[in-house]
Image (cartoon, rainbow, N blue to C red):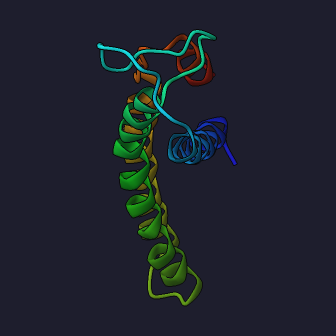
Amino acid sequence: MTTRSRRLVAWALVGGLAFVLADCGGAASSSTPFASTASGAPSAADLRAYVAQVEGVRLPVNRLLLGADPILDGYRTHTLTPQAAGDQMSALEQQFATYVVAAESLDPQNATLRTLNAP
């Protein structure tokens, strides 16, 4: 697994964790949206916003990864030549790279979420 693949898997885990935390926690009372609690921990609204941003990358990646199975199956059953399978996998990798860039460009407003997003 490449470094970029590992990063995206980490993103999925962070997104899932953020979703769980958002579902469990209550929002801090504030007149401004996406306000943090006094401890600097993200509010429920911060987490929901962050999860929505992450989901914008995670869901297309999931769809993209579903496209790898037919390529691998075609290669294994010899309905795709090694060259064709390689070309199709290269196209998937190029698309994946655009999703990595999108994931890395997320800029959460909350400092704690920004720290989680930094790696």
Res 48 → quadrant: top left
Res 6 → quadrant: top right
Residue at 36% across, 53% down: 60
51 and 26: which is toward the camera = 26
29 and 85: which is toward the camera = 29
The answer to whether residue 33 is left or right of residue 28 is left
Q: Position of residue 40 (x, y in %)?
A: 59, 11
104 and 44: which is toward the camera = 44
Residue at 57% across, 9% down: 38
Among all residues in the image, which is located at the extreme right?
1
Q: Position of residue 72 (x, y in %)?
A: 54, 75
The answer to whether residue 82 is left or right of residue 33 is right
Please say if 44 is above or below 69: above
Residue at 60% across, 19% down: 41
The answer to whether residue 99 is left or right of residue 37 is left
Q: Position of residue 32 (x, y in %)?
A: 30, 13
Q: How many marks?
A: 0
Among all residues in the image, which is located at the extreme front?
29
104 and 46: which is toward the camera = 46
Please say if 13 is above or below 105: below
Q: Position of residue 119 (x, y in %)?
A: 63, 22
Residue at 58% across, 48% down: 20
The answer to whether residue 74 is left or right of residue 98 is right
Please say if 92 is above or below 40: below
